[in-house]
Amino acid sequence: MRKSRRTLVLFLALSSAHLLLMSVQVQARSGMPLIQAAAFGVLAGVQRATAGFADGVRSFWSDHVASQGVVAENDVLRQQVIALEGQTQAQAALVGQVHDLERLLNLQESVIPPTLAARVIGGDAAPGALTITIDRGAADGVEPNMAVIGHAGVVGRVINRPTAHAAQVQLLIGHNAGVGAITEQSGAVGPVRGGAGDPPLGMDYVDVLKEVVVGERVLTSGLDGIFPRGYLIGTVVRAIKGSGDYSEIAVHPAVDFSNIQMVLVILARPAGTDGGS
Amino acid sequence: MKVAYALLTVGLALVVQMALARYAVGGRWVFDLVLVGVVYAALYWGPVAAMWAGTLGGLMQDALTGSVIGVGGLAKTVVGFGVGLAGDQFVVARPSVRAAAVALVTVGHRLIIVGLLAVVNQAWNGVPWAAVLMETGLNAAAGFLAFQVTDALPGVILQTRQRRRSSLGRRRW
């Protein structure tokens, strides 16, 4: 009897502590950075170790056990590298032309921001959170709100303060995620937000007078101060003109979020932070 | 000691959760191994150990996901308390029954979290039933595996020892 009463008292005490913790955050309208930083700091090292172990096992498997067909794959990849080198040279020539034009027209020269490759070492701690952990942090120059891209397009942004060698990235498809966007052909501007269902991205506040067409590419507009202009977000899969002032635009993301192994952190400081962009 | 075991279980579950979630980013596979760990602790070590495990596991999850800290902690504390008490009152011995308990608790836990977030955010976003269904199935499967392995492990170790002893005995003979 006494034991069950003690259990009940402990339950009530723990529940009250949780409620108190929640009410403090609701009143302050902010999270608890210290607790978050401590928890992330503790687990980032463990995640790095488990990711290293998992990658080691996988590379052993792929290097020594499942290496059939590697020669044929190698040939295909060589051909792709040659094709990509050609494309890179063409792009470099175009960039040179753009710089020349900018100089001629006395425009401010556009700068290609430096990037940093990072490995994904962890996923969501809780279901539905849609964050990943990468193995680059403050020691590598990563700061909160820096944009993160993949080989196909925009992945998300760095959230919270990174530890020395790890950072947390909020995925673009997450509920509170968003990015300033512009459609490539029609030039419609508006924020793209995550958590929209199926497809997971939706573009808001698009003027009903803009003729947005299905299949049109959606790029970053650079207006949010986080993502530089011109990176691919996705493709329009549904464009419905509503009765109001805005169209309903659904966007299919360019990145396959179920298979992200490597990402690039854009090391340009977001607007509004020390140093500016 | 029970509390220490429970905390270790939940810590391990959190590490495995984050390691596996790396390959399931994007919301297609939804699972919560920390919740499975809390139910495991509740059924093996009772409500007190499970409540501490739920508190620690939930708070860590809240902190790592940037959510309101305390929501997951409270939900998992409630789960630990409820399952622990039920485990004391009823005989829940078979792995399949325990897995069914995990499934039931998953739905309850998700409803508590959705309710608490609705109160905190002052907005009702509805219950994502498809995700809840997926989570229920995967959590139950993970729970079944964990309970089955834990139940089978002592027997396997005993058999191995006996086999080794009998083979040593034959060698002496």
Image (cartoon, grey):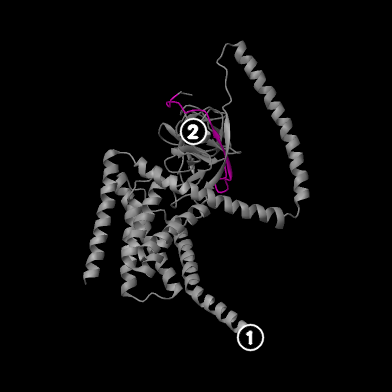
Q: Left or right: where does residue A205 sit relative to residue A112?
A: left
**Mark 1 residue crowding within 10 angstroms, few (<14) / some (14–19) / many (20+):** few
> Which residue is drawn at the image coordinates 40% and 51% (left, top)?
B61
The residue identified by callout 1 is B172
Quadrant of the rendering where the C terminus of chain B is positioned: bottom right
The secondary element bearing badge 2 is classed as loop
Residues at badges 2 and 1 in contact (C-beta under 8 Å)? no
Quadrant of the rendering where the N terminus of chain B is positioned: bottom left
Q: Are marks 2 and 1 on the same chain?
A: no
Q: How many marks?
A: 2
Q: Left or right: where does residue B117 sit relative to residue A6?
A: right
The residue identified by callout 2 is A146
Camera-side residue of B109 and A51: A51
Q: Left or right: where does residue A190 sit relative to residue B3?
A: right
Q: Residue furthest bottom?
A: B173
> Which residue is drawn at the image coordinates 36% and 51% (left, top)?
B59
Camera-side residue of B162 and A19: B162
Instruction: Please check the rendered image and state whether residue A264 is part of the magenta-colored stretch, yes or no.
Output: yes
The secondary element bearing badge 1 is classed as helix
Query: Given the image, on which type of amino acid does mark 1 rest?
Result: Arg
Q: Chain of mark 2?
A: A
Q: Chain of mark 1?
A: B
Closer to the eye: label 2 or 1: 1
Query: Visible in this render: residue A233?
Result: yes
The stretch in magenta equals: A254-274
In the rendered image, residue A259, in percent from the top left (x then y), is placed at: 58, 48
In the rendered image, residue A132, in percent from the top left (x then y), is placed at: 50, 45
In the figure, A59 relative to A265: above or below? below
Query: Visible in this render: residue B32?
Result: no
